[in-house]
Image (cartoon, grey):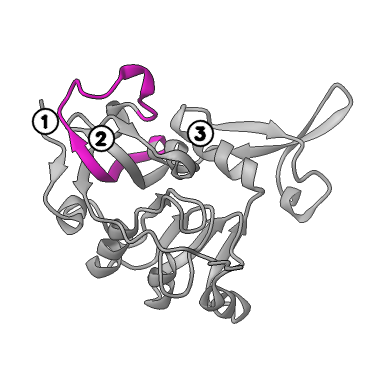
Amino acid sequence: MLDKVYTSPAAALEGIVHDGMTVVVGGFGLCGIPEQLIIALRDSGVRDLVCVSNNAGVDDWGLGLLLRTRQIRKMVSSYVGENAEFERQFMAGELEVEFNPQGTLAERMRAGGAGIAGFYTRTGVGTVIAEGKPTMVFEGETFILERGIRADLSLVKAWKADRAGNLIYRKTARNFNPMAATCGRLCVAEVEELVAIGELDPDGIHTPGIFVDRIVVTTSEKRIEQRTLR
């Protein structure tokens, strides 16, 4: 069986990243983001990226690192409120932005991974989200068509993996990661712990290894986005 384990984040991305590609990135805020793979993507020097992620990180971490180096051409997100550089680029017309309702974004990823080209939803009807999108009426209610997302590359963060690429996420880090993992033509997973094949309970696997092409073991910083003290 093909060994999916790579020695470093840079090695895990070697030969599969290029200018202009669409990259789906897992995580919610700073929780469960593939932080070391994001750094490796920055260091690769690729540009004109379309990044699909719940958020745009913060100014000095996560996808904020790619915004700082101007490597992102377009963001497809549901929440971007923690990043001043994102705001500056957006207001200056330097960054393309496509906003999605959060549930719609998650379902667009899931649909893309399941081979579903599009789906109808009531979310966003009558708002700017619906502008230019086809509509259908079901049982007297108007629905808008949303397209499934298929990306060139998925970057995800998992807690445990085996060498076949089966993944388990830990608690809140199981947010956008399972959907993100399936909708990329290639998927690279950053993991905290690697175990032998057969050690994971099959009933506890969140992402089957068939979706995962490369694995790299990293030590995560796990920064806190907003630290609240009493």
Q: Do tag 1 and tag 2 residues touch (Cβ < 8 Å)?
A: no
Task: Give the farthest residue toward the right.
Answer: 140
Q: Is residue 186 magenta?
A: yes
The residue lying at 84 percent from left, 48 percent from top is 126
Q: Is residue 213 visible?
A: yes
Distance between mark 2 and mark 3 Cα atoms = 21 Å
The residue lying at 46 percent from left, 53 percent from top is 31
The residue lying at 67 percent from left, 48 percent from top is 101
Q: Is residue 181 magenta?
A: no
- Please provide percent x and percent y for residue 47: 34, 68
| N-terminal-most mark, 1 or 2 | 1
Name the image quarter holding residue 11: bottom left
- Disc 2 marks a residue whose amino acid type is Ala
The answer to whether residue 108 is left or right of residue 46 is right
Report the disc number at residue 161: 2
Residue situated in front as seen by the camera: 22 or 165: 165
- Please provide percent x and percent y for residue 83: 54, 72
Which residue is under mark 1? Answer: 2
Distance between mark 3 and mark 1 Cα atoms = 26 Å
Which residue is under mark 3? Answer: 110
The answer to whether residue 46 is left or right of residue 58 is left
- Please provide percent x and percent y for residue 151: 41, 45
Query: The residue tagged with tag 3: helix, strand or loop?
Result: helix
Magenta segment: 182-207
